[in-house]
Image (cartoon, rainbow, N blue to C red):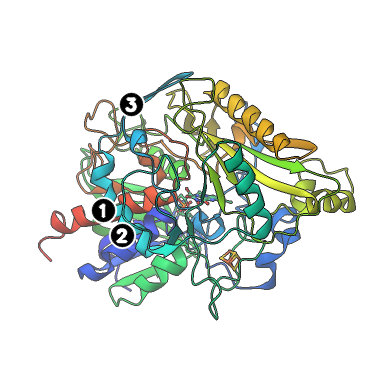
Amino acid sequence: MSQQFDIIIIGSGAGGGTMTWALAASGARILLVERGDFVPQETENWDPEAVWKHLRYQTRERWLDERGREFSPYTHYNVGGNTKFWGSVLYRLRRDDFGAVEHVDGLSPAWPIDYDTLAPYYDRAEQLYQVRGELGSDPTEPPRGPYPFPAVPHSGGMVEIVARLQEMGLHPSPLPLGLLRPGDPGGCILCNTCNSFACRIHAKSEAEVCAVRPALASPYVTLWTNACALRLVATDSGSRITGVEIERNGVTSIVQASVVIVACGAVNSAALLLRSGGDRRPEGLANSSGLVGRRYMAHLATMMQGFHPLRKNSTVFQKTVAINDFYLHGPASPYPLGQVQSQGRTHGVMAQTVVPWIPLWAYNAWVDRGVDWLAMSEDLPDESNRVIVTRDGRIQLLYRPNNLRAHHQLVAETKRILRKLGFWIVVGHSHGARNTTHQCGTVVFGTDPRRSVLDPFCRAHDVENLFVVDAGFFPSSAAVNPGLTIAAQALRTADHIMTTDLKHL
Ligand SMILES: Cc1cc2nc3c(=O)[nH]c(=O)nc-3n(C[C@H](O)[C@H](O)[C@H](O)COP(=O)(O)OP(=O)(O)OC[C@H]3O[C@@H](n4cnc5c(N)ncnc54)[C@H](O)[C@@H]3O)c2cc1C
Ligand code: SF4
């Protein structure tokens, strides 16, 4: 097989999968390199015990935390990356998120592009991932046309909750969701095992189904699974990549291409650049700013549950409601607090992972009477929050969550609302400093090469043929789910690559 391609894309998740789809028609010979395999369609996909107790699909890799203690990162190495397991809540950033925003604990910096620049690519990303939503009901929504598909209707129980929230003066809106053909034969069946599960019937809008598989129909796209990029090989000056060292089925080889696109996820992309410096550049590749790995962010997230002992929750598909009333400022604070979303149903086994000694029957009785929510706030970029690679090559995450006052206010406000809705008990749980699901910010994009790693098209300032198109480019984490923004920027970068690096084709 040829070891020479026009483009190598490393990682097949939201960034890499979307990029592969966007470049597939360019006529360039593309190699997509993915360290994992396809997730099989099997009964375990929807089995809470397999997913939550035996961690069947999560990576076995262990990372180190700030104090050098091992932990299992909640991340997945497979075709489609973490999108296979996402809740498919596909939001645009709010217009304000692109500007500098003062938060209670500091400044959320401006992006080098504004909302209007990304809006056409959001349109295309929403088409690709078949997003369903309702125009006009969310007070924070940026200017836009109608969604490609109508919103998923609320279940009976959630209709009641939405009406009560409106009586309280709030503005609940349908969550924008990527679900394929709900209600149609072969389409989404609106089940209770979506967020954190792979869809057994391939009805979730995720990168494997919507982007990678369609791209593979092109004769120009080659996918290598179980192929891990170990290192980028650069010229002596470090200004150009000449090859990628890849380990595949136990064999290591160097593959060449004129354009290299890294999309390993924010943590792994930073780690790959840091590992690629060699003796000549111990600080890593593309790192003249010293920012590779720094400014790690991951959102402040608390899973919350309102419990009523006498009310059984009959909702199956629960994840349809957003409350964005506190996104730009709190009820008694001029600062942003974040977003509240209803969540997929918690299963007893999931809840048991928090306090394992409580018997499963008790958890099942509890979750049968609970309604699940997620309170999510922005964390702020801080250069001491960072990914490093230890001497023996392991990933270490130095992360101290910040902007906690805003998050605590959001959690307190959510508790107050849930109590007003009649829930007797409200509980919350957070992964705190080990939260990796919304990882971002480690190779920030910007216009100043001294203050950013990538330019506004995600090309490395220091390396002319290197792009990074995963969540690493985020200068701020905003407080909505990151996936659609990663996909939109990948589409924008693909257009740029086609008119610059590939114009000779
Ligand atoms: C349970 C869960 C629920 C979520 N829900 C939502 C949601 O509802 N909405 C939303 O917007 N976001 C959600 N997210 C977050 C979302 O999935 C991520 O933000 C998004 O997938 C990140 O895209 P990415 O391209 O940066 O990385 P990923 O999607 O993680 O893709 C990175 C890929 O690179 C591969 N890779 C890594 N290193 C190498 C290497 N060295 N060589 C080869 N391949 C490599 C990985 O195997 C992986 O396939 C959720 C995440 C999780 C875990
Ligand atoms: S059937 Fe629908 S709700 Fe169930 S996992 Fe698939 S996409 Fe999600």
The number of numbered badges drawn on the structure is: 3
In the picture, measured across the screen, residue 289 lies left or right of residue 57, that is left
Q: Of marks 3 and 2, which one's residue comes earlier in the chain?
A: 3
In the picture, measured across the screen, residue 474 lies left or right of residue 241, that is right
**Residue toward you, 256 or 111:** 111
Amino acid residing under circle 3: Ala
Residue 457 in sight from this viewpoint: no
Q: Which residue is mark 2?
A: 124
Q: CA distance from mark 3 to mark 2?
A: 26 Å
Mark drawn on residue 120: 1
Residue 383 in sight from this viewpoint: yes
Q: Disc 2 vs disc 1: Cβ atoms closer than 8 Å?
A: yes
Is disc 3's CB within 8 Å of ligand 1?
no
Quarter assignment of residue 51: bottom right
- Is the residue marked by circle 2 packed among few (<14), some (14-19), or many (20+) residues within 10 Å? some
- Element type where label 1 sits in the image: helix
Amino acid residing under circle 2: Arg
Residue 336 position within the rendered picture, expressed as x and y whole percent measured from the top left:
47, 27
Residue drawn at 53 percent across, 78 percent down: 184
Q: CA distance from mark 3 to mark 1?
A: 22 Å
